[in-house]
Image (tube, grey):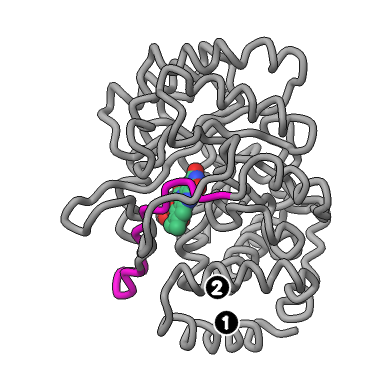
Amino acid sequence: MSNFISQASYKLFKTAAFQLDPEFVHEHSMGFLSKFPGLSSKIFGENDLGTRYTLNIGGNSWPFPIGLAAGLDKNAMAIDFFSKLPLGSVEVGTVTPKPQAGNDKPRLFRIVEEESLRNRMGFNNDGADVLLERIKRSQKNGRVLGVNLGKNKTTPADKACDDYATLYKKFASDCDYLVINVSSPNTPGLRDLQGEEEMDRIFDALAPLRTEKPRPLYLKIAPDLSDEGILSLVEISKKHNLTGLIATNTTIMEERGPGGVSGKLLAQKGREVRFKILEALKETPDIDLIGVGGVSSSQDLFDFWKAGGNLMQVYSAFIFQGPALLQGIFQDVEKLLQRNDSDSLSQLLENRDKIDWL
Ligand SMILES: Cc1cc2nc3c(=O)[nH]c(=O)nc-3n(C[C@H](O)[C@H](O)[C@H](O)COP(=O)(O)O)c2cc1C
């Protein structure tokens, strides 16, 4: 079906949905999409990506370089739906070992005029057992599946490593990559785990499990770190042989209220953190950076590629633009390939200094 119809249907949905409470809409949309996974191909067309756009990064083949960021399909309800959109990956979670309710409502807010969101969800999720069953039942349609791991609120900081180990063990055989999330601002003390000692404790606890069940492993970090903090986490990723970093999670903007802000209000900060990390990783091409935070157009992706990055994720822009965001990026990537007379994206990015950009 044409882009015009899919754009019109999302516009219509958005007009109604934005009159209602954001979390109410989110919950009901996910419930609906879980029941009608075939809807994506009906409305948005078949998105059989083939191999033209595939990037082989960190032990996985991403059929498209844009993925869905954690938190949107928190409970792994609609993997089948998202796997039919022009997305290369779906990251579910954050999941904690035990189910938990999260913070009191309301806890999700739209900042419409700035195409941004603020949330103080607090890792509300159905827990590891339920998510694992849903993941096992899902059809990924060739997409890469990531699972984002967090600690329960009641787990003390010095026992956080046990939660991450439990979750690693649980999900390693049923996903394509795992993420250690220590960067949500909504679990008290979580971001303190980004300290060197705390990181060592977590990754030392994971080491034997990683030997037993090797699986690509990323660390997701906050945008609100000092330059030294960022560089120390780059060093941690090298020291513990991680597949890469994911930057960034939401940012704290006290003037906007409690919680973490995402979308356009995060874009500049997220970009600066990512460029710092890419610079620091220049000498270690084996460690990758998945870029996230304020990504809202193909230009963001192209700028990331110019700086040496490969894969990005989206969340807030998808809420504001709908699947048209993905279709627009897809079309621009195709235009870039055609303009450069290139058969594949991986080939194109091998010689990125010579690319004739759009
Ligand atoms: C409502 C909401 C819930 C989120 N939940 C999680 C989460 O559970 N785990 C996580 O790692 N990131 C979570 N995030 C952060 C996103 O994955 C992403 O890092 C952040 O929103 C920045 O990207 P964006 O500007 O494209 O939204 C959440 C974001 C939002 C808006």
x then y, percent, for residue 130: 70, 47
Question: As rendered, which of 357 and 92 lies closer to the eye?
Answer: 92
Q: What numbered label is drawn on residue 355?
A: none
Q: Amino acid at mark 2?
A: Gly
Q: What numbered label is drawn on residue 10?
A: 1
Question: As rendered, which of 11 and 92 lies closer to the eye?
Answer: 92
Check if residue 121 falls in the magenta segment: yes
Q: Residue at x 67, y 62 (%)?
A: 334
Q: Is residue 140 left or right of residue 314?
A: right
Q: Residues within 10 Å of mark 2 (few under 14, many from 20)?
A: some
Q: Residue at x 77, y 14 (%)?
A: 212
Q: Is residue 213 left or right of residue 156?
A: right
x then y, percent, for residue 153: 44, 36
**Residue denoted by label 2:** 322
As helix, strand or loop, the secondary structure at mark 1 comes to helix
The N terminus appears in which quarter of the rendering? Answer: bottom right
Residue 315 in view of the camera:
yes
Q: Residue at x 51, y 11 (%)?
A: 239
As helix, strand or loop, the secondary structure at mark 2 comes to loop
Q: Amino acid at mark 1?
A: Tyr
Q: Are marks 1 and 2 in contact (CB under 8 Å)?
A: yes
Q: Is residue 22 above or below residue 145?
A: below
x then y, percent, for residue 59: 73, 30
N-terminal of the pair, mark 1 or mark 2, is 1
Tell me where the magenta segment starts and ends, as one range.
110-125
x then y, percent, for residue 227: 27, 27
